Amino acid sequence: MRARPRRRGSRSLHRTQERRGRSVTGAAVRVDPETERARTPGAAVYRHFNAAGCSLPSSETLDTVFRHLILEGSEGGYEAATAAVERTSAVYSSVARLVGGSASEIGMFDSASNALRTVIDSWVFEPGSHIIVSRSTYVSHALHLMSLARSHQLTLQVVDAGPDGSIDLELLKAALSRAAGAPSLLSVAHVPTSSGLVEPVTAVGVLAREYGALYLVDATQSVGQIEIDVDAIGCDVLVGTGRKFLRGPRGTGFAYVRSSASARLARHILDVRGTVWDADKSWSSVPGAVRFETWEHSVAARLGLGSAIDQALEIGVDRINATIDSLAAPLRDGLSKIRGVTVTDPAAAASGIVTFAVDGIDARDAVLRLRSLGTRLTSVPASHGQWDLGARSIPAVVRASVHVYNREDEIDELLSEVREIAATTVVRGA
Ligand SMILES: Cc1ncc(COP(=O)(O)O)c(C=O)c1O
């Protein structure tokens, strides 16, 4: 008779699950803020609520950047790059592990905006082509698309949001069917700059495939805080930046470009990095998303990005997400209970970005008041999102964005500071 397996005690099961970053029910366990704070030098200095602007990097990421800069100083920049070549090529695999796809479908950039611009400028369109966008589109991207539409007489359709603030899928379907017959480009921001909204990018992907649109996802504000899988989303292109929820260095970004989209993105810029000048007046493109890159870049920053991504993967993006959610949700809720404060996030808000307005005080002044108290956050004006804030007649919002190095007591402190500002403003205005 085979011995029955010994039932593990619930305490030991609990401990094993927690070590794997899971609760006994399988849910992601929150990250320990003290561990994260210990490895984040900036966390001890201010209350930092600006992950959506530029988050605080870990010491490991900073060390990776410093070490390479020091090597450049002693060896020379080219020699240092040669010495780091295996580690720099591993960064492509790290991005692919983070968002899906293969390493050859990843191109590296210095920002998400440059990644988007470069890929869009490669798009092969025809007279009559449509550009279809969500209201969540980021300012630089919107400006680029408006200018492209204007100079090539393309039709630009901005799809309205539904009652919960996310893109209305019925209206999107109608927009895609209006565009049928010519190549169309559909672009959605996963999380916008101007609110905590999370767009239904997977449902959008189903429609993009149904209508054959080239589908771009701007994951600048979601990558690092929300798990991403380009195959589940069904996008052709996805871009991200290093310095926000990934906690990477400034001046880093990437694009995932699906290999099957090559023919539709054939007009890429010609640079020695991605193009071979093979004879007198002829050239050929190298395969993969590298063809979109330019040769010059900061090797130190790119290595820092790889390090930040590896750390995020080691922690688990699902755990980072659970932690961020456990901080953002009470912050949103607490703000909604303060007299004189309006939470400006739509109902579909579910990210680490929390936006609000304080009656009678300009968002920029509120940010300065909070800064003088040791709290760092930012404001977003309507000029950074006319299709969102402008359309909702909101001139500007205060934006607080949390990360794993924030503690619950910092949230409480922020709430009491906002309460104080709102109270003094209400008294002054009364
Ligand atoms: C939604 C969104 N997309 C794109 C960008 C631009 O990113 P980058 O500054 O890396 O170009 C931002 C920056 O705030 C953003 O919030």
Image (tube, rainbow, N blue to C red):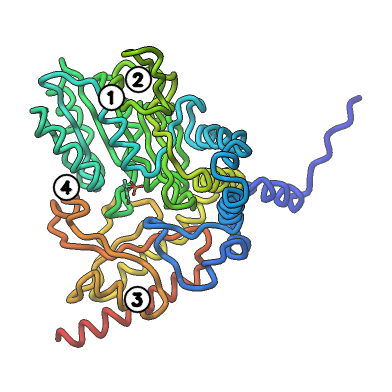
Asked if the residue under mark 2 is in contact with the one under mark 1, i.e. CB atoms within 8 Å, the reply is: yes
Callout 1 secondary element: strand
Q: Are marks 3 and 2 in contact (CB under 8 Å)?
A: no
Q: Quadrant of residue 132?
A: top left
Residue 371, label in figure: none
Residue at x 20% of width, y 63% of height: 396
Q: If the image is split into quadrants, where does the N terminus sit?
A: top right
Place of residue 368 in the rendered image (x, y in percent of width and height, measured from the top left)? 30, 75
User: Disc 3 on helix, strand or loop?
Assistant: helix
Alpha-carbon span between mark 1 and mark 4: 21 Å
In this picture, residue 9 sits left or right of residue 418: right
Residue displayed at 42% across by 30% down: 230
Q: Few, some or many C-alpha atoms within 10 Å of disc 1 (few <14, some 14-19, many ≥20)?
A: many
Nearer to me, 87 or 355 = 87
Residue hosting label 3:
370
Position in image of residue 331 (x %, y %) = 39, 65
Residue contact at pointers 1 and 3, CB within 8 angstroms:
no
Rendered view: 418 above or below 38: below
Mark closer to the chain start, 1 or 3: 1
Residue 261's disc number:
2
Q: Amino acid at mark 2?
A: Ala
Choose the circle earlier in sequence order: 3 or 2.
2
Residue pointed to by mark 1: 214
Residue sitting nearer the eye, 282 or 45:
282
Within 10 Å of disc 4 (Cα), the crowding (few <14, some 14-19, many 20+) is: many
Say which amino acid is labelled 3: Leu
The disc, 1 or 2, on the residue closer to the chain's N-terminal end is 1
Residue behind mark 4: 387
In whole angstroms, how far apart are the C-alphas of marks 4 and 3? 28 Å
